[in-house]
Amino acid sequence: MSNISVCASCGIAEVDEVKLKECSACNLVRYCSDECQKNHATYHKEACKKRAAELRDELLFKQPDGTHRGDCPICMIPLPLNKKSIIMSCCSKLICRGCHYANQKREYEGRIEHACPFCREPIPSTDEGFEKQRMKRIKVNDPVAMRREGVVQYKKGDYSSAFEYFARAAELGDAEAHYQLSLLYDEGHGVEKDRGKEIYHLEEAAIGGHPDARFNIGFEEDESGNIERAVKHWIISANLGDDGSIKTLMALFKQGKVSKDVLALPSVHTRPP
């Protein structure tokens, strides 16, 4: 009987006819109904908030396996952070320069039509052709194409449309779109300035492996007086190859604000603060 779960509000045990559901915010307690969860909210509020924050930090301070740019889908080598890669409008794949060059060489030597090195779709010869391919990808809910259209609208000065495309892409898990939304909330373009939402989208982008977002969060934490949290963010970003984070950590080391042991500790980026 000790292994049987009970409702945190009314105490009813989970049996065949009673199914309990966990509190989605903290996973600490379970309830038999929405009414019981509502009745218990006053007693559970503080513990729930504390545990939810702990779970968020566990996720936020976990070292990503790679950056948000991922690997080249052809050679499977991690894509560089310097953005010297080729985005294909036909399939929204990001191709490394090496594979792009190899494809061009193959086409030239074989005297064959220029096509995407990944999906082999013909490459458009006009801007209108690229736009047509991008809009086709958007219709099938491609977050990369949505985000790219958001960039196009932003450059046109249509910030409201840019926000809508970035928001749609972010809902589908695109880390770069979350980063772009953080910039809009910071600038107040297309939306009202909102520091809370800016930080939220920076965190979502950072969790997705976006070094620039992680770098910015570090400065937000530093300005708030949370240097330990800032350093952990910069260590994670540095491990992803971000030059800005590496330089910042070296400057802090020279100033005596961070020790060699902290910088050398391999597990520091895997533990919550």
Image: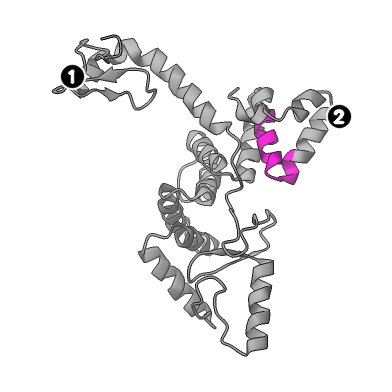
Disc 1 secondary structure class? loop
Residue type pointed to by label 2:
Lys
The answer to whether residue 258 is visible is no
Percent across and percent down for residue 38 are: 24, 19
Which numbered disc, 1 or 2, marks the residue that appears first in the sequence?
1
**Nearer the observer, 95 or 3:** 3
Horizontally, residue 91 falls left or right of residue 99, namely left
x, y percent for residue 257: 79, 23
For residue 151, say whether it is visible.
yes
> Quick one: label 2, few (<14), some, or many (20+) residues within 10 Å?
few
At x 60%, y 25%, the residue is 271
Residue at 50% over, 22% down: 54
Which residue lies under the disc numbered 1? 15
Task: State the extent of the magenta-drawn residues as a range.
Answer: 230-245
Residue 23 left/right relative to 134: left
| Secondary structure type for disc 2 | helix
State the mark number for residue 254. Answer: 2
Residue pictured at 48% horizontal, 58% vertical:
147
